[in-house]
Amino acid sequence: MLDDTIYDMCAPLLDPKLSKFAWYYFVVSDRVSVRYADDSIRQQIDVYRSCQRDIQHEGQREPLLDREGIGRGGEMTCRSNAPVLIFCTGGAWLIGYKMWGTLLARALTATGVVVVIPDMQNYPSVYIPDMVHDVDLAIDWTFKNIAEYGGDPTNIVLVGQSAGGHVAMMAVLKKIRRIQVENNIASATQESIGAERRGLEDDNLTGKWMPSDLKGFAVISSPLNLRAMTEGFRRHGFNDDTMDRMFGFEKDKYDPFLALQEILREEQVQILSNELPPIHIYHGTDDKTVPYEVSETFHQELSNHMTGENYVSFVSYSGWSHTDPILEGPMDADHRLHRDLFNDVKNWTDSSNLIWPDDPIMNDRLCPHFMIQIGRFFNPF
């Protein structure tokens, strides 16, 4: 019922732009969709290779698209051993879908990055702990298989937006917490081993990757402090009972802020600095869905304890809403987030050969400004 309501509310926002999304997604992009697990049809992953047409124009290869987003002719050449960006899409844990990352894939593949966008199961089909498991499996699949699609498994960056950032952060923090608990078990007395093992009772993550395997982690407009979100959830129709059910009645265990504090309470705090990749947190100051302050508090808590080469930074986008960084902004030729993520990948993976294309086809707005403003008016997020 709730997901149907949100879909109906979103329809006016999506309709003016859907044709460009669909044309790139289904026709033009060099996209491969594969399974990363076999429990659900939703456990699929889209891999966007970084390709160019071999059409020379003033000494430069042409991008895949013309001004209308239509594919050009010519032989296509795809990069190999390219840096990889995994993008976990948002959707309020209800309407998440891998297609929501199409604009990001369009922008980043043009710079030489392979973009991987996993789908995950939504509530009410599963609970949020199952979504964290899905993301864990998708990341594990990427490390094991991305070389077949031109990506470098030693240069992977994780990115999550909104609910996707939440579940990705929980996967990362749970991996770190597991290391702490396993270390505690190794040094525990016989009497205390049982208590330590209970720290792993809700750990269903089976992927072999570790957070330190990632070159970096970017989080965009994500609910990283659930207790600070209570009133916001209620305003959007998520009452307390609904939230409890969505989280499988384990909401506190899947609150990134509380999970971080649990890690910080342990004597082995150094594990956090050793395992956590560099983190950049991005948030619009006019976000009415996930208040800007939610990211601020998480950033402050995390940055107080980061040491060594790893670091955390916070970037605010003045006047931007919850979806402006990934939807309305790029549609209106404002690629601030895309450029920031491009720079993250370039710096974290030491890929100095990556270049943001100076090409109006990639940088111009994708539909008239007034249509984007109409979309902003109806956007429930």
Image (cartoon, rainbow, N blue to C red):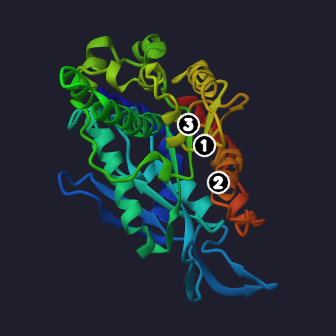
Q: Tag 3's secondary structure?
A: helix
Whether residue 77 is situated above or below residue 296 in the rendered picture: below
Q: CA distance from mark 2 to mark 1?
A: 8 Å
Q: Nearer the viewer, mark 1 or mark 3?
A: 3
Kindly identify the residue that appears in the image at 56 percent across and 36 percent down. Answer: 273
Q: Position of residue 256 (x, y in %)?
A: 44, 26
Q: Amino acid at mark 1?
A: Pro
10 Å crowding of disc 3: few (<14), some (14-19), many (20+)? some
The numbered mark at residue 133 is none
| First-in-chain label (1 vs 3) | 3
Foreground residue, 219 or 333?
Answer: 219
Q: Amino acid at mark 3?
A: Ser
**Quarter holding residue 297:** top right
Kindly identify which residue carries mark 1: 278
The answer to whether the residue labelled 1 contacts the one labelled 3, judged by CB atoms less than 8 Å apart, is no
Q: Position of residue 157 (x, y in %)?
A: 54, 53
Q: CA distance from mark 1 to mark 3?
A: 9 Å
Kindly identify the residue that appears in the image at 69 percent across and 55 percent down. Answer: 347
Kindly identify the residue that appears in the image at 27 percent across and 21 percent down. Answer: 250
Kindly identify which residue carries mark 2: 348
The answer to whether the residue labelled 3 contacts the one labelled 2, judged by CB atoms less than 8 Å apart, is no
